[in-house]
Image (cartoon, helix red, strand yellow):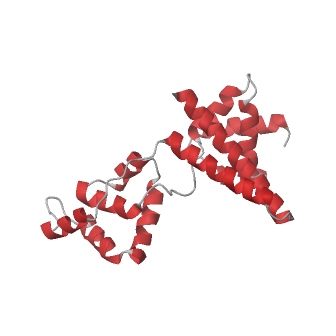
Amino acid sequence: MNDIEWESFIQMLNKKGEKVNLKKECKKKGVGLDTLYSKVNELNHKEDKKEIAKRFLSMHPYRPRDVKEIDFEQLMRESIIEKTSQSNLASRYRITKRTIQRKFAEIKETNPKLHDIYERYCSLKKGEELDAKIIQEVCEEFQQQTPVSTQNSLKNRREEFLKRLQDLEQGKKSQQNANLINHYRRQLKRVEQQIEEEQEKE
């Protein structure tokens, strides 16, 4: 696609709103998600196109794929102790409910005892309580977490990408490494773009 077609495509995505499936829309056009964000970045550096980019980034900000800062076993204990829902936890820790569901499912394998208590907690009817001994046991192993700010999370990810790039650039030269270097450069650009957006909000 040429620049005019890209601009039109991004505006179409903006009209569809934040629920639009970006991967699906990119597939229809035969383009990659990384390329889409690269084109949004280009618009973001053109004064007369900045608003188009800003609208897109406000609906589709960069979100790290993994959530290394969060201990999901502690999150499960927090849910039991505070009687709080996955939706509330998702909002508190700025992660998706789907991520919580996926990570909680993994706990069934890594800590079946805790997962069993959580399932019993989820199946309680209104007015019912878990046994006090069970709650005490959960409390004894609980450590409150402090949600990492979006800005710090993004900065941590930037450092991670810079380190990976440095390792790859110092390593053996190969086509595979060249492809990985390009991938991490694109990801780094996306993170830095999002850091700029967050700073502007402040």
Q: Position of residue 148 (x, y in %)?
A: 45, 46
Residue at 38% across / 46% down in the picture?
Answer: 92
Residue at 48% across / 59% down in the picture?
Answer: 99
Q: Going by the image, does 26 lie left or right of 74?
A: right
Specify the quadrant of the image occupied by residue 117. bottom left
Q: Position of residue 86 (x, y in %)?
A: 36, 55
Q: Residue furthest top?
A: 48
Q: Residue furthest front?
A: 170
Residue at 40% across / 62% down in the picture?
Answer: 72
State the count of labels.
0
Q: Position of residue 95 (x, y in %)?
A: 46, 51
Residue at 53% across / 28% down in the picture?
Answer: 201
Q: Foreground: 5 or 93? A: 93
Is there any visible trace of residue 68 in the rendered image? yes
Q: Foreground: 28 or 153? A: 153
Q: Going by the image, does 58 lie left or right of 163?
A: left
Specify the quadrant of the image occupied by residue 124. bottom left
Q: Where is the N terminus found, in terms of image quarters?
A: top right
Q: Foreground: 144 or 183? A: 144
Q: Position of residue 162 (x, y in %)?
A: 68, 50
Q: Going by the image, does 199 lie left or right of 145?
A: right
Residue 4 to residue 64: above or below: above
Is there any visible trace of residue 19 in the rendered image? no
